[in-house]
Amino acid sequence: MGWELSSAPLDECLGLGEYIRLLVAALGSSDPAALSRLREVVGERSARIALDEESVDVWFEGGELVVQEEAPREVSGTGGTDTATVLDLMDGYVRPREAILDGRLDATGTVEDVNRMFVAIEILLDAAPRSPALQKVARRFRNDPCRSRAEHPRRDTSAARTYPSRPGPGEESVLRRLGLLPGGPP
Amino acid sequence: MIRPDTLRPPAPSDPTAEAYKDWLHLNVFDHVSGAVGLVNVSLSGAPDDPRSRAVGTALLHVPGHGWAGNLEAQGFDDAQIGQSAIALERVALAVDHASGTVTASARFPDDGFALEARANSLVPALAVEEPLPLGPGWFSWYAVGRLAVAGEARVDGQVLPLSGASAYHDHNWGRWHWGDDLGWDWGAFLAPDPGPAVILIRLTDRDRKATLPPALVVHVDGGRRTFSGPGVALEEHGRLAPPARGVPGSLASLHSDRGDPGLPSLVRVTADDGVDRIEIEFRAHAAAQLVTAEPMRRGYGFIHELAGEFRCEGQVAGVALASDGLGVVERAA
């Protein structure tokens, strides 16, 4: 299925699943090698991605992206955030580490699955400067009337922008919640 | 009037066109509010390649508020590119050499930021037309060390009048790739007019080892004095908090490992040629990170803007110096 940006009027709200389809289609059209790496990294895994109140399951089947908005299935990992956080990340007001520590960005799964989710995101981000098509998707998201800054105002991060030699309270709290500190979960 | 200058796009047959870079830059120093800002418009990549990008950046550090502004990127075809002007949707900068005027504007309503500035040159331009080695590539430089500003900035509804502010303008062009073994230290230190305006430039490799002797240009009392070579020294002390802002955010996120580049909180520059002498102590208040990307092949550069205040002392061209002002130090690697 071809997902062209031109098929979506700029003043129309697009759903999460449509953006994921647009991103993968844009990656494939501008950097097929990067899409191959993305497929390789994802492999047989599936993920549940949530944005605000939306949630979709995604995976590759026969090399093609599948986005399923309906019935939840067993997935390898989950990732969730909200539109304000996506805009804050795009505008450089927050970095992923701070978003995670602030509880604004969640990723769950085994270490391997979570790692591969972030590598998949990195492949998209790394391809974007050389892909006008991916940049167009980013502009489409920013111009989406349902994703406006007025409706999703920026938020200051409470996480310190320092990289201490030992975890700070925020990081320690996340590690404790996930049972990753010595002694296991509380 | 200032010395004529234009953007330098490559000829269609230029085999190095994909490494093409052209930058127009304006730094604004508002001595009343202490705000220090930059407006930069740039072109990167072969003009006939649809991947080539025009990038506009406008950032203003306001004491007590932090960094305001943002960055945008467009294809060359979507930008308006003139002889010495680049206008994107939200950021534009134009130089009129006949009147000696640099006009800059930026509008990022989602960030609560707008800036309109018209800057008139007060000193002659300095032009280095011959290519200077920059890593495996080269660059050339055209700079106006002091301009007087009229205009205003708006940050989250607060109006900052810029009349009385000082400015610095430069134009860089050349061929290089972000991610190559190159870097630079650059600084502009402007006391309120008629005080001194001082420009520092030092080209480095990516490990910040100097590849050419540093130079310090001092505008004072209507004259210009240039120090260069071993008589110019830089020292860095302390550690500044990591950049509070990284733009574009997508690339700052991609390079989270560069989130704390270990920037200094104090930079001391001394220059002494046996006749004249100047010492500058710059205290940084905050840093922003600009992540630059090659549009046609993989490669990234990291430019850090440190906004702050300085004090300088010394004697240049018979003038005793003891001035305070605002400054910016830029570190690229």
Image (cartoon, rainbow, N blue to C red):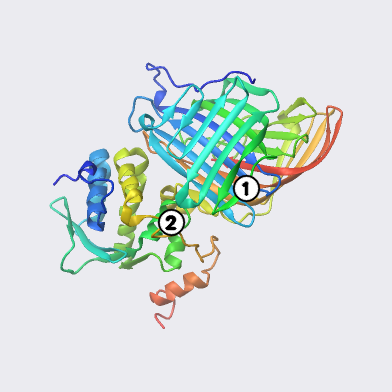
Look at label 1 and name its amino acid: Leu
Q: Relative to B287, is B225 above or below? A: above
Q: Position of residue B307 (x, y in %)?
A: 63, 47
Q: Quadrant of the C terminus of chain B?
A: top right
Note whether residue A180 is visible: yes
Please name the residue shown 64% across and 36% down the image.
Answer: B150
Please name the residue shown 52% across and 42% down the image.
Answer: B58
SS under mark 1: strand
Look at label 2 and name its amino acid: Asp
Q: What subunit carries mark 2?
A: A
> Residue B11: which numbered mark, if any?
none
Q: CA distance from mark 1 to mark 2?
A: 25 Å
For disc 1, the marked residue is: B160
Q: Quadrant of residue B75?
A: top left
Note whether residue B213 is visible: no
Q: Relative to B129, is B104 above or below? A: below
Q: What subunit carries mark 1?
A: B
Please name the residue shown 62% across and 35% down the image.
Answer: B210
Q: Quadrant of the N terminus of chain B?
A: top right
In the picture provided, is B224 more to the left or to the right than A63? right
Q: Position of residue B79 (x, y in %)?
A: 40, 31
Q: Are marks 1 and 2 in contact (CB under 8 Å)?
A: no
In the picture provided, is A23 more to the left or to the right than A170? left
Q: Position of residue B191 (x, y in %)?
A: 74, 39
Q: Position of residue B313 (x, y in %)?
A: 82, 40
For disc 2, the marked residue is: A88
Say how many tags the image has.
2
Q: How crowded is the residue under tag 2: few (<14 C-alpha within 10 Å), some, or many (20+)?
A: many
Q: Relative to B289, is A154 above or below? A: below
